[in-house]
Every structure is written in C-alpha cells, then in structure tokens.
Image (cartoon, rainbow, N blue to C red):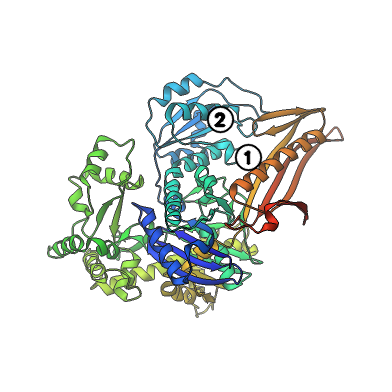
Amino acid sequence: MSLFLGVDTGGTYTDAVILDDATDRVLGKAKSLTTRQDLSLGIGRAVDAALESAGIAPGDVAMVSLSTTLATNALVEGQGGRVALVFIGFDEGDLERGGLSEALGGDPVIRLAGGHSHAGQEAAAFDAAGLEAALAEHHVMGFAVAARFATRNPTHELAARDIIRRVTGRPVTCSHELSANLNGPKRALTAVLNARLIGMIDRLVAACESHVKKRGIDAPLMVVRGDGALISAAMVRERPIETILSGPAASIVGARWLTGATDALVSDIGGTTTDIAMLKGGLPEIDPLGARVGGYRTMVEAVAMRTTGLGGDSEAHLILTGLEGGFRLGPRRLIPVSLLAVDHGAMVHDALDRALGMESVGEHDGRFVIPMGFEPAGLTPREAALLARITHPMALAAALTSRLEVAAMERLVARGLVMLAGVTPSDASHVLGGLSDWDAGAAEKALRLLARRRNGRGDRMAGDAATLARAIVDQLTEQTATCLLEAAFGEDAAFEGQDGDTLAQHPMLKAALNQHRGVMELSARVGVPIIGLGASAPFYYGAVGVRLGAQMILPEHSGVANAIGAVVGQVSQRATGLVTSAGEGQFTAHMTYGPERYSSKEAAIDAMLVALTADAIARARLAGADELLIATNQDERGAKVEGRAMFVEATITVTASGRPRVAHPSPATEEGSAGISGTGYKIT
C-alpha cells in the first residue's frame, strides 16, 4: 500500500488524513484545535487520531505533506515579525510604489547607494560600509534585500546578504531569488513579506517534523505551494512566501479529487478566511499577475484565488452609526469566546457574569486578551509594559489601564504577540445549535451582553442572544454570497473589463436575486455549481446556495479537503532567465550570478537554456521530486528598425515537474535512467 499522510494547519483547526494512493481511498481522518503557542501539540493530536482512525502503523506512511493557511492569515490580518528592508539604489519615492510603504507598516528601511542598470551594468558602487554601520541600529527578526535591477545583476543583493548573515546571523531574503520581474518595489514588497513569515513557517515545519519523527514516521516532508505544487520542507524554510494560498490551493486540488467536477466555483470557509477559486476543465487557474492577499499584490505564482477576511472566527464588528445599526464581519480573526472558555472557563464565565450584572455595557466587555508567548522585538516602552502585564488570558478591560493603551494593544495584536477573543459567527452558531464543539453557555452570555449595546435610536441591538446570533449568521451568508458573486463576475467573459465588485453590489442584481416581480420582472442566479468546503460549510452554505440560486455541492470529507489536496499534488519547479541585446553582435545572458556576454543570439540562448535546465532540475530535486519531466518555453520579442528585424530580448523558462519522492523507492528507480517523455525529457 502507498499510504500518504496529509496535514493542514489552519487558524482554528489542524486536519490530518491518511490516503491510500493506490486505491484513492481515505482510510482515516481527524481534526484538532491549532495550538499557536506550540504548533506541535495540535499537529500531534490530529496526526495521532488519523493514524488510529486508519488503523495503520506509523512506519507504513511513505510520504507526509503539509498545507497551511497561517501565512495567508498573517498577511490578511497584517501580522508577522518585525523586519528591515535594505533598499539599494532606489529613490525615496520608490517606497510609495506597489504598496511597499504600507506593507512595511513602520518597519525600518536602510537606503544605500548601489544598484545596476537595465543592462546589468553597475550604476553606483555598493555602500558596504554604510550597511555594516546601519545594522547595529536595528534589532529585527529578519532582513529583506532589494537592489535596483537585481534580476539583471544580483551581485549587490548577494553582497548585502553575506554582510547581514555575518554581522547579525538573522535570516535574509533577496528579492531576485523570489521573482525575475523588473518591478523593483514589488520585488521588495515580496521580499519583505517573505522575511516577515520566515519565523512562523519555520516553527510550523519544525513542529510537524518533530512529531512525525517521534511517532516513527520515516518519510519525506513536503509542503504545498500557492500554485498547488509541492516543495520540500527545506526549501520552504527559505521561501515561506511561496506558501501563501497554500491551504486554499490544496483545497482546490482536494475539491477536484473529491467531486470529479470540471467547471465549478470552489468556496472554502475556514476560521479566518473564505477562499474562492474557479475550476475550469478540472484545473485551477493560475494568477498571471501574482498572488493577491490581504490587499498586497505579490510576485508569487499562485492559484487565481479571491481571499477575503471572512470566516467562522471573524470578528463581529458592531455598527452603531445610523439609526438601525448592524454587523460587519472580519477581516480580523478572534478566538471565539466559546473556544476560550473550553480551557479557561472559570475566568471567562466570571468576567461575563460580572459584566451582565452591571446596568450599562462597557466598551471592552465580553472581550479577552491572550498572550502568544513569542519573543518580542522593537517594542515601545508602552507596548513592552502592556505585554508584560498580560501574563495569562484575561478580560481585555483588566489589561488596559487607560485609553492610551488601546493603540498599543492593537500593535501587539498586529505583531502576533497577543490575540483577542470576542464574539464570532462560531459563537452565534453554538447559540443556534449548528455547532456544539465548544462552550455554548459562554457563547450565549457573550451574545446576550452584546445584544444589550444600543443603536442610534437608543434601542438594544437585539432582545435576546438567539436573535442576535441569527443576525450574525445572516450577515455571514450575505457577505459570502457577495464574495461568490464578485468571483463569478470576474470569471464571466461577458463582463470582462468591468468591476465585478461593483456589479456584485448593484441594487438591480440584489432585486434579481430576490426574484423581483413588479412592472419589471428580474431574476439572476450563479450558473455553475458551487463546491462548499470547510468544517462549517454544511451549516452555513445551504443558505448561501439558496441565496444565489445555485447548485451547492457539499462533498464527503469536505472538512479535510485541504489535507487531502496536500498529498495528491505534484512537485513543480520553474527557472526563468532573460537574454537581451544592446546592439548588433552584443548579446547578454542574465545569469543568476551576473551577466554573461556573447557574440551571437544562439550562443546566449543555448547557454541560458543549459543554466536554467540545471537550475530547474536542482530545484526540483531539492523540492523533493523523483522522476522529472523537463519542459521549456521561449518567448522572443523583436522590433523593426529601418525595415530590418532586430532581436530585443527573449524570456526562457524551464520547468521540471514530477511526483514527490517517497520513503520506499522501488528498485527500478534507484539506479537512474533518462529517456524521452511528452514535450520535454524525463530524468529519473
């Protein structure tokens, strides 16, 4: 039997599944709460329960594969470690381009002389001494390095990387290693986000590795990339940015495997986000502009996915403006009050009972703060004092001594040093009986407390907890339906070039969905099936299907679709290079180590192909692939000058792909062979 273990670590739950690759059967599955302070605990409980459910020995597992939404969630919620950007050869105004300044969020920038020209020639000498002096001034978790035209010549980025590693010992991300794109600010943005995620993903991979080793599983550990392909754990530690949309990508692969559907919208609701993608012809679409997450457009190739901060654990924002008031859910995830009460019941119930015993409701009543236990860096004195006070889970009002500390608390949340707990759709679902995993009594008290808040008329938001719970769940239905409509308009060729977000909110569309009958008769529905995934999908998505007039498919095992998708994908690595011409008889191959000059176009392209093929094969091997299929693509661009065709540049791409290496290779593959396969060639 070829037994694979798939693990998906989400913001709320960690899922595990045992899959028999030979028969395409799920043998066992399990869920456990994600334990952020020590991820190995949640992973261990899920893995152990899945092994027990399948009735197999740990030593029979041939491969372990991991997907996660932790990186996606961190970007959506604006969290991550404090980093410094080393910005070489750029102007001050470049920081404002591509969302870079916003993404930095006040993290330090070290601007230095240096950089190269479009042709790869040094534009200015690299200020190595200035970098060494600046490093002593900044205490951060990691560094991102971006130099002007580093994709044409990376020597200044490499020099900065070596200095940072020698002086600080901290992780360093170079922008040219993540993207071959010329857009410097966007490369810098991608490098900043990568540097910010390194600590988080390293903890996740280490947690998974330690538990499977402890259980006696001697098998390679793979991780799902944002485009659904697999890479080795060693590679993902260096390039964690590639795991953004990892969980959603795995869910798309899992949805296809579970349903066999070829054309459908896939909507996966988790604790933090709702992720929507389109299956066309049985394959997910790849976003050619790079993954967009949390308002940031990265240069990471990923599934074309709409990720919205809307999930079962989304913060229920009370809208007190206007006469009626209402709710808006997300984008921040809270720990549901009902979940916090599972481990801290006495504290939670005591705080809620005291608040319910008061005549008026305080601003922070029903909310709590929980320390995450991570190492702080770069805190202000006020933030450090506040964090030192939060030694254990407590009522939020008890942690704050003045209104001046509210902003400091928000910054601690953004750094991932603490989490807030409060009312969420999960709490509402416990009150309504749709979920029963946690403390429904605590949820009822928290919603009763929130219902006592008053709207613009001076009336209470609701008469009881159940009425308020129904309003929150109805709001989740409405926001989910809107997300799906935005995606549907974006995929419909008839609306190409139009703003799908605006169309989804149009009053005429809302009337049509309500089957308006008057002087005008209007109707509308989503014309392709919707596959609903996620543990809470069966409770929430029936109403969503009715709202959109769509066929809603809720497959068996939909709650662990991510974990299934984690083990049924392939390894794929791509290497891209550029050949340019500065004039007749002058051709440059822009290699990873710097430019090489050639006297003919053919020689430059051949040299680039050899280098890229070796690079793609090496990456695929490092990523954990065994048998490789190599495919090449050449995109050549030219121009006419005085009636003569002139070569301008060629972009060359080499892709190496194959199934992941497993623990027990067959004798036929151990010796190694080479042959022809498909449009490329096969290496084993």
Do the residues under discs 1 and 2 have CB atoms within 8 angstroms? no
Under mark 2, the amino acid is Glu
Residue 180: give its label. Answer: 1
| Callout 2: SS | helix
Quarter of the rendering occupied by the N terminus: bottom right
**Mark 1 or 2 closer to N-term?**
2
Q: In this rendered view, identify the residue nearer to me: 381 or 480.
A: 381
| Callout 1: SS | loop
Under mark 1, the amino acid is Ala
* Image quadrant assignment for residue 468: bottom left
Q: Position of residue 592 (x, y in %)?
A: 65, 34
The residue carrying mark 2 is: 157
Q: Position of residue 4 (x, y in %)?
A: 54, 63
- Front tag of 1 and 2: 2
Q: Residues within 10 Å of mark 2 (few under 14, many from 20)?
A: many
Q: Is residue 260 above or below residue 297?
A: below
Q: Residue at 35% across / 66% down in the picture?
A: 425
Q: Is residue 44 above or below residue 520?
A: above
Q: Residue at 57% across / 47% down in the picture?
A: 300
Q: In this rendered view, identify the residue nearer to me: 316 or 179.
A: 179
Q: Residue furthest front?
A: 667
* Image quadrant assignment for residue 462: bottom left
Q: Kindly tell me whether residue 270 is visible in this rendering.
A: no
Q: Residue at 42% across / 29% down in the picture?
A: 168
Q: Disc 1 versus disc 2: distance between alpha carbons?
A: 14 Å
Q: Is residue 84 above or below residue 282?
A: above
Q: Kindly tell me whether residue 293 is visible in this rendering.
A: yes
Q: In the displayed structure, does residue 189 sit left or right of residue 491?
A: left
* Image quadrant assignment for residue 135: top left
Q: Position of residue 543 (x, y in %)?
A: 44, 75
Q: In this rendered view, identify the residue nearer to me: 616 or 264.
A: 616
